[in-house]
Image (tube, rainbow, N blue to C red):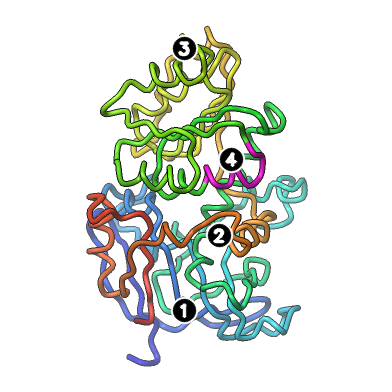
């Protein structure tokens, strides 16, 4: 099997297993990546547990879109020949670069957008894969490769900050609430501090071990909605005003209405979390109307900001080491998914090691 590409294939709910596939070929501006580290995203756990939305039954794909690795080969049209054997983080979005959205600087809204780990583009739970040259971002030699997997979710946080600032200007001096202290929420609160320096950052989360880490990473106040009233606590903390912006990062059905209730009149809700049931976002019209609420949705990340995300990690502006709690070889990916689904063993981020 040494000349085969060991891969994990997802074909439906709870239907995930090892296959040995042909090695990918390299041509044009393709770059072959040796997949050393791929981090599990919570959305992938949802797809494993509930199934992928809007795909025919039996559709199979290799998941994994939080990626880092080593350049193993380069195509004949690759411009930067020095990338050979470089340590890199990978932008998993395959954007055309030609449509009106790409040309205007929003390739995350590309009209032809494809995404690694969603059909028809395979992701990183395999030993080797190819990506276009523009999707490869060198990381510093002294930065651990596994940190590179966190660049993608950090970039989501950067995009969330950008969405908020387009509406209200700088977040400097503002009070924000982050709903959900999973990996994305913990990264987003740090990104907010690094980019905009808000006056206060409040974090809401029902799991105490995550709340403890949020506090350690800089949250001004932590709130467990299962043991105290978020509304009463926020009203008390803000002298009855409410927060300026809430970032909904959990994807929990109840969190969307809570996000709308916590902001002051004329406030803003930035929706980052992806709900399990994606038919609608449950925010009451009467809440939104009477408070003059502004709601903005975050579409993943802007690929143009990927170098900024890498730099924020490498410089320590966003601390990622404390988030990486578990590591598993490719053969043990199902137990890794089970752990994340059950929130067991104080798990935060889990790295898959395709070559171990």
Foreground pick, 202 / 93: 202
Q: Measured from the top left, where is residue 284 in percent x and y?
A: 42, 15
Spatial separation of the CA atoms under disc 2 and disc 4 = 14 Å
Crowding at dot 3, Cα within 10 Å, few <14 / some 14-19 / many 20+, comes out as some
For disc 4, the marked residue is: 160
Crowding at dot 1, Cα within 10 Å, few <14 / some 14-19 / many 20+, comes out as many
Work out whether mark 2 precedes mark 4 in sequence or the reverse, and give the earlier one: 2
Q: Measured from the top left, where is residue 345 in percent x and y?
A: 23, 56
Q: Which mark is residue 128?
A: 1
Q: Measured from the top left, where is residue 207 in percent x and y?
A: 29, 41
Q: Which mark is residue 41?
A: none
Spatial separation of the CA atoms under disc 1 and disc 4 = 31 Å
Work out whether mark 2 precedes mark 1 in sequence or the reverse, and give the earlier one: 1
Bounds of the magenta segment? 188-197
Foreground pick, 73 / 194: 194
Work out whether mark 3 precedes mark 1 in sequence or the reverse, and give the earlier one: 1
The residue positioned 68% from the left and 67% from the top of the image is: 134
For disc 3, the marked residue is: 287
Say what secondary structure mark 1 lies in. Answer: strand
Q: Nearer the viewer, mark 2 or mark 1?
A: 2
Question: Which image quarter: residue 83?
Answer: bottom right
Identify the main secondary structure in magenta: helix
Q: Quadrant of the N terminus?
A: bottom left
For disc 2, the marked residue is: 151
Q: Measured from the top left, where is residue 291 in percent x and y?
A: 54, 11
Work out whether mark 4 precedes mark 3 in sequence or the reverse, and give the earlier one: 4
The residue positioned 55% from the left and 53% from the top of the image is: 154
Picture layout, residue 206 above or below residue 64: above
Picture layout, residue 296 above or below residue 211: above
**Is residue 194 inside the magenta stretch?**
yes
């Amino acid at each position: 099997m040494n000349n085969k590409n060991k891969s994990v294939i997802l074909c439906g709910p709870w239907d995930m297993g090892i296959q040995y596939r042909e090695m990918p070929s390299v041509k044009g501006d393709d770059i072959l990546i040796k997949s050393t580290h791929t981090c599990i995203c919570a959305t992938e756990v949802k797809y494993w547990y509930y199934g992928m939305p809007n795909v025919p039954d039996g559709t199979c794909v290799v998941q994994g879109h939080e990626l880092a690795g080593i350049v193993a080969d380069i195509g004949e049209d690759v411009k930067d020949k020095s990338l050979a054997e470089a340590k890199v983080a990978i932008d998993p979005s395959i954007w055309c670069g030609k449509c009106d959205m790409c040309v205007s600087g929003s390739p995350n809204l590309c009209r032809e957008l494809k995404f690694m780990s969603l059909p028809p583009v395979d992701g990183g739970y395999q030993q080797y894969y190819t990506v276009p040259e523009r999707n490869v971002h060198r990381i510093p030699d002294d930065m651990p490769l596994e940190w590179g997997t966190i660049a993608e979710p950090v970039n989501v946080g950067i995009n969330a900050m950008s969405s908020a600032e387009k509406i209200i200007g700088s977040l400097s001096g503002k009070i924000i609430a982050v709903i959900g202290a999973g990996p994305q929420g913990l990264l987003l609160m740090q990104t907010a501090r690094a980019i905009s320096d808000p006056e206060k950052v409040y974090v809401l989360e029902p799991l105490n071990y995550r709340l403890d880490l949020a506090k350690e990473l800089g949250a001004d106040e932590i709130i467990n909605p299962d043991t105290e009233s978020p509304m009463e606590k926020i009203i008390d903390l803000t002298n009855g005003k409410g927060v300026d912006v809430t970032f909904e990062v959990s994807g929990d059905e109840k969190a969307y209405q809570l996000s709308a209730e916590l902001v002051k009149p004329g406030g803003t809700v930035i929706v980052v979390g992806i709900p399990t049931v994606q038919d609608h976002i449950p925010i009451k019209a009467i809440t939104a109307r009477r408070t003059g609420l502004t709601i903005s949705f975050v579409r993943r990340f802007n690929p143009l900001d990927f170098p900024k995300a890498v730099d924020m990690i490498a410089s320590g502006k966003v601390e990622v080491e404390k988030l990486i709690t578990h590591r598993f070889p490719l053969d043990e990916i199902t137990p890794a998914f089970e752990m994340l689904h059950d929130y067991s063993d104080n798990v935060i981020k889990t790295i898959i090691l395709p070559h171990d």
